Image (cartoon, rainbow, N blue to C red):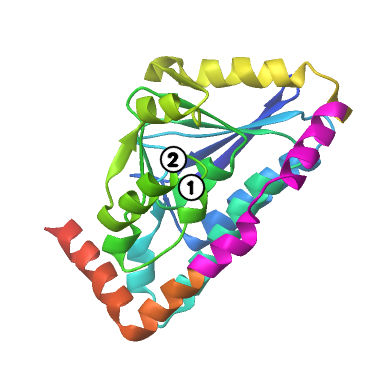
Amino acid sequence: MSIEVTTAGGVAEVVLDFPPVNALPVQGWHDLAAAITAAGHDRGVSAVILTARGRGFCAGVDIKEMQRTAGHAALLGANAGCYAAFAAVYECAVPVIAAVHGFCLGGGIGLAGNADLIIAAGDATFGLPEVDRGALGAATHLARLVPEQLMRAMVYTCQTVTAAQLLSFGTVYQVVPREELRAAARDLAATIAAKDPAVIRAAKQSLNGIDPVDVKRSYRFEQGFTFELTLLGAGDRARQAFVDGDRQ
């Protein structure tokens, strides 16, 4: 399990590798936040690519870690880690390109939704299974990808949408064959990195400044309902059902 960072030509590439499905443990979220923040602080970097190895981009939090950890330490840690990682993507001093393949679920939506640009493989799907997991969160970020009523339907039903659908909404920049994903992301990042670094950094700051929604505060509000559901017992029941079902 790792987060790999390489830098070349003004572009930092951050790669998630948490087999089998890139469901990040608590420490993984914090490590990701630190890696993205550090890349943005590197004055030789003008763009960041966030991508992943394996079957999909990100399946969210490691629910099995939560269920095998006594008490609520892992739940609290995951919530803090997701908050930090999503904020790091949004606040990164340079544009972040999410290169998404396979599934982008739960916490993956938080990462992709806060990215400046998304390039997706043709097999990419996006969704929030939170209701089925007894939790809430990242609707803030899903709302940056799909229209309001569809976002609500996706939250209530846990249905997913395809990269092609997001392309039609204009929230995915490009859809490419999976084998071309990394190259397409690098080409786009290189185009950005060829611009004046000072202007690109100012552009990122200015665009965040005119956003109509405070994504950090909005997401934190959502997280509070996950804590309530846990206190009610609904959260733990849903998480355990997921773990038990995965064992069958």
Is residue 116 shown above or below 92? above
Question: Of 79 and 12, which appears nearest the observer?
Answer: 79
Residue at image position (25%, 54%) is 157
Indicate the position of residue 28 as horizontal and vertical percent values: 53, 54
- For label 1, the SS is loop
**For mark 2, what is the residue?**
146
Q: Main secondary structure of the magenta part?
A: helix
Dot 1 crowding, Cα within 10 Å, few <14, some 14–19, many 20+? some
Whether residues under marks 1 and 2 lie with C-beta atoms below 8 angstroms apart, the answer is yes
Residue at 80% across / 18% down in the picture? Answer: 195
Q: Magenta stretch: residue 210 in it?
A: yes
Q: Assess disc 2: are there few (<14), some (14-19) or many (≥20) residues with their C-alpha within 10 Å of its C-alpha.
A: many
Percent x, y of residue 87 = 64, 53
In the image, what residue occupies the spot 51% across and 41% down? 112
Q: Residue at x 59, y 39 (%)?
A: 115
Residue 217 placement, left or right of 145: right
Above or below for 137 versus 146:
below
The three-letter code of the residue at mark 1 reads Ala
Extent of the magenta region: 199-222
Q: Is residue 85 left or right of residue 74?
A: right
